[in-house]
Image: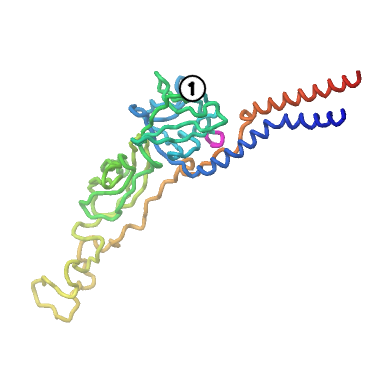
Amino acid sequence: MRRTTTMAGLVAVPLLATAPLLAVSTSASAQTVVDATTSDSTVTSTLRLAGSNGFVAVGSVDGVEQAHTNAATADAVLHPEPGASGPLIIGDRCFSPLNGPGLPYALVIDATDPSRCLTMRTVASADGSLRFVADDALSPGNGLTLEQTPGSSALRLGDAGSDFDVVTRGEFTAPELTETTITVGSDLAGTAQPGAHVVVVRGTDVLCEADAAGEDASQPGAWSCAADLQVGEHDLELYGVSAANQPAGPRAVHVVVADASTDPGTDPGTDPGTDPGTDPSPEPGPDPDPGTDPDPAPGVDPAPGAGSLPGTPSATTAPTPTSSPTATAALPDRLAYTGAEVGTATAAAGVFLGLGGLLTVLRRRLRRS
């Protein structure tokens, strides 16, 4: 009976020792499944603390890298859509799971591996502002809300929380040109991120500038400006500055300018407003034979410069800038856990193993005595 009891104890002690690790593994597996369902719900925005003139960014403050709201230019922020959970990445930094209550500023880490980032949940207010709540059971900051530290521009995790306004949505890229074949006197026109400032450049000369329509306009992002281009072909560059002061460009465009008397979209040999089989206004001189073709004689150029126009946009198209991999790549969620996250469970397992060994030694001594 004693031998049976001893063997049962030797089997039970290792099981008790490994129970904490099994619990952590089960929790980690469940967390991975939940996060995987929200990995495609990440969007890109630029943010401003509600009521503040500064943008959300990561920088060095008093020699310490931290997220703050005193930047003149915003960083692109990758965050979950309202109602979803995932990493909150500012530029190339995210919040560490070690964040907790009482810190003067939030700890930020490299976001190259998003699985190491603190999981946050995005909550939208009725006015469109956002809040970010830690949604990570393995972090001491779980349940805390991102907020501005009182008396500072630093961001931290706390109980009060702060509202953040969305300044721009989506990845910011250089403006685009709608038509690359125009007539003399026509404005250049295109699209850009709503609220962006557009600059058209030829070589080192700024030809014109314009502000793209805002999100509330009938055509959000539409812009136009008078470049005063002469007949011929022109290589231009388009630059943009977002409403959050982010630069983009240049985008190269090739523009063909035709004479104002020629419509580049029609055949220069016919009058688009008349029947091609009749001649409404014959030139002075002998009347033409009614059976002849009213088209001009071969070799006659009906309008200066029209013979070189294809009537369609130039084959030279603007190259599309390469998108930032961090902004377009789907971000994986928590797929692995660091040693720090299982440190408590490992320590508990060690204590159980030690007690089990001590108990075994004592039982042997009692049997010998």
Identify whether 196 is placed above or below 283: above
Residue 117 in view, yes or no:
yes
Left or right of 123? Residue 139 is: right
In the rendering, at what x and y percent does residue 288 appear? 13, 78
In the rendering, at what x and y percent does residue 73 appear? 38, 31
Quarter location, residue 249:
top left
Kindly identify which residue carries mark 1. 64
Looking at the image, the residue that sits furthest to the right is: 368
Identify the residue shown where x is 80% and y is 22%.
Answer: 359
The residue tagged with tag 1: helix, strand or loop? strand
Left or right of 111? Residue 345 is: right
Quarter location, residue 170:
top left
In magenta segment, residue 173: no
Identify the residue shown where x is 24% and y is 54%.
Answer: 231
User: Could you tell me which quadrant the C terminus lies in?
Assistant: top right
Identify whether 83 is placed above or below 64: below
Q: Who is closer to the viewer here, 85 or 5?
A: 5
Left or right of 169? Residue 210 is: left
Q: Who is closer to the viewer here, 185 or 323?
A: 323
Q: Range of the magenta residues?
A: 111-116
Residue 209 in view, yes or no:
no
Is the residue marked by circle 1 packed among few (<14), some (14-19), or many (20+) residues within 10 Å? few
Left or right of 206? Residue 1 is: right
In the rendering, at what x and y percent does residue 160 appear? 42, 24
Identify the residue shown where x is 23% and y is 49%.
Answer: 187
User: Could you tell me which quadrant the N terminus lies in?
Assistant: top right
